[in-house]
Image (cartoon, rainbow, N blue to C red):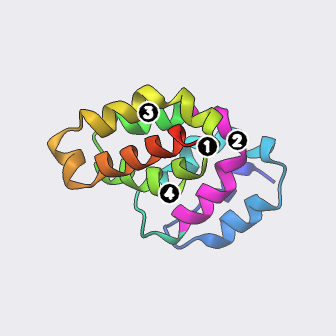
Amino acid sequence: MEIKRLIPKDKMDIESVNKLKALDINLFKPIIPDLLEWTADANWPTTKEIGKLLLPLGRELVPHLRKIFASDDDCWKYSILVKLVINLPKSVLSEMEADLKRLAFNPTEREKQELVDEEAADILSLLYQT
């Protein structure tokens, strides 16, 4: 089966995500950017499920997450923070500490409107908990 066929077709396509869950995680590494596109809104059903699917990749997600944080899609930043980043292990969060600090302490006006700064600050507080 060609893995690209399992990229969700729309925000409600949980069936494709469930098929991916049955596969070895290494098989869908090439489509990580495509999967992350279906996490652009925290209200989409695909967002939560793809977050769970990708979570075991840990550090391998960091470059992809940084691209989202560098984008101008503030809704996507919020969504990825609340549905995926918050669940990453502290070791992975520590690699993104500079990104999270920028979002939390030096947000754009639009990031503030989407509450990106508040979510990033909450995640940073988790990083510093013992």
Residue 57 is marked as 2
Please provide the residue range marked out in magenta.
46-62
Check disc 4 and give the amino acid type: Trp
Badge 3 or badge 4: first in the primary sequence: 4
Which residue appears at 53% of the width and 51% of the height? 86
Q: Check if mark 3's residue and mark 2's residue have beta carbons within 8 Å.
A: no
- Whole-number angstrom distance, CA of label 2 to CA of label 4: 17 Å
Mark whose residue sits in front, 2 or 4:
2
Residue at the front extreme, as displayed: 130
* Residue positioned 54% across, 43% down in the render: 129
Circle 3 crowding by C-alpha within 10 Å: few under 14, some 14–19, many from 20: few
Name the mark nearer the viewer: 3 or 1: 3
Question: Measured from the top left, where is residue 74 in percent x and y?
Answer: 29, 48
Check disc 3 and report the residue beneath it. Answer: 67
The mark nearer the N terminus, 1 or 2, is: 1
Q: Are marks 1 and 2 in contact (CB under 8 Å)?
A: yes
Q: Position of residue 117 (x, y in %)?
A: 29, 45
- Neighbourhood count class around disc 2 (C-alpha, 10 Å): few under 14, some 14–19, many 20 upward: some
Q: Secondary structure at mark 1?
A: helix
Q: Which residue is mark 1?
A: 32
